[in-house]
């Protein structure tokens, strides 16, 4: 009498939306250091723009049927903590599938914030033309202050890559650069262009 062998647990199908991003030829299907760092910083900028940023990340993941990848807050924290500059950096790799999910969520949230992002970048340009500091624009100053606070509370100050941003001025430059990147990914084919840019110089 032959017994039926137990069936192996089925692997959940890859969310269709992730098929819009190509698979880069990286070793063992895991993300390089710079890719992990950059994705986390973009999400940090979104959190500085939106007080409910961390909740919005999980909410949009649910809306886009990405909960098979971004299951809950702990998993999200583990993914973001693959950024080597974090205080509690995780040694676990960030898979290409996980990175795709984070990039898709980043781009969708950036699109929701497009008007605000444009306003802040325009305000910065106008202040620069008049040789005025960002403190002269309440909303821009608020974003920069919040970004600096997030960065300093979450990144490891002993890392050389964090020491580079020891001054307010350097962190402001980083925060503004991230705003430009977020605006970049809201345009035509922005998601694909951002994704490819994350691997520039990392793959042959």
Image: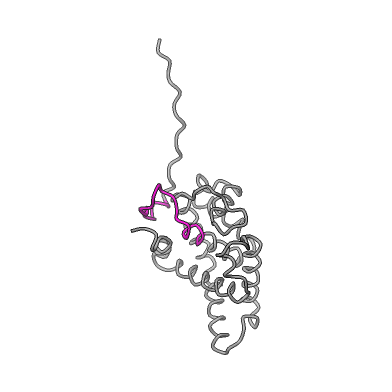
- From the top left corner, tell me how far across and down residue 37 is, in percent: 51, 60
Residue at figure coordinates x 52%, y 47% from the top left: 92
Question: Where the C terminus falls, by quadrant?
Answer: bottom left
Image location of residue 177, percent across then percent down: 51, 72
Query: Which residue is at the far left?
Result: 204
Compared to 88, does 186 lie above or below? below
Q: Residue 42 location in percent, x, y?
A: 53, 63
**For the view shown, which residue lies furthest in the top direction?**
1
Colour scheme of the picture: one colour
Picture residue at 54% right of the left edge, 63% below the top: 41
Q: Is residue 26 magenta?
A: yes
Q: Nearer the viewer, residue 134 or 59?
A: 134
Is residue 196 rendered to the left or right of residue 79? left
Residue 102 among those drawn in magenta: no
53 displayed left or right of 201: right
Residue depicted at x 53% and y 77%:
121
Quadrant assignment, res 200? bottom left
Q: Quarter-wise, where is residue 187 in the image?
A: bottom left
Q: Is residue 193 above or below residue 126?
A: above
Question: Magenta residues?
Answer: 17-39
Magenta part, dominant SS: helix
Vertical placement of residue 183 versus 33, above or below: below
The residue closer to the viewer here, 127 or 156, is 156
Residue toward you, 14 or 128: 128
At a point 56% along the width and 76% down the height, the residue shown is: 120
Q: Quadrant of the N terminus?
A: top left
């Amino acid at each position: 009498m032959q017994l039926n062998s137990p069936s192996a647990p089925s692997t959940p199908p890859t969310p269709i939306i992730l098929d819009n991003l190509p698979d880069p030829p990286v070793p063992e299907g895991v993300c390089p250091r710079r890719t992990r760092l950059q994705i986390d910083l973009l999400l940090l900028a979104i959190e500085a723009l939106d007080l409910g940023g961390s909740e919005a990340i999980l909410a949009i993941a649910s809306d886009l049927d990405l909960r098979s990848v971004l299951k809950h807050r702990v998993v999200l924290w583990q993914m973001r903590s693959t950024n080597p500059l974090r205080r509690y950096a995780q040694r676990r790799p960030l898979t290409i599938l996980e990175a795709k999910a984070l990039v898709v969520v980043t781009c969708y949230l950036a699109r929701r914030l497009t008007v605000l992002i444009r306003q802040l970048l325009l305000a910065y340009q106008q202040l620069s033309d008049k040789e005025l500091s960002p403190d002269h624009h309440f909303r821009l100053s608020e974003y920069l202050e919040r970004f600096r606070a997030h960065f300093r509370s979450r990144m490891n100050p002993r890392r050389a890559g964090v020491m580079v941003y020891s001054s307010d001025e350097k962190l402001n430059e980083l925060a503004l650069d991230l705003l430009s990147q977020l605006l970049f990914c809201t345009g035509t084919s922005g998601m694909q262009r951002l994704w490819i840019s994350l691997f520039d110089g990392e793959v042959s």
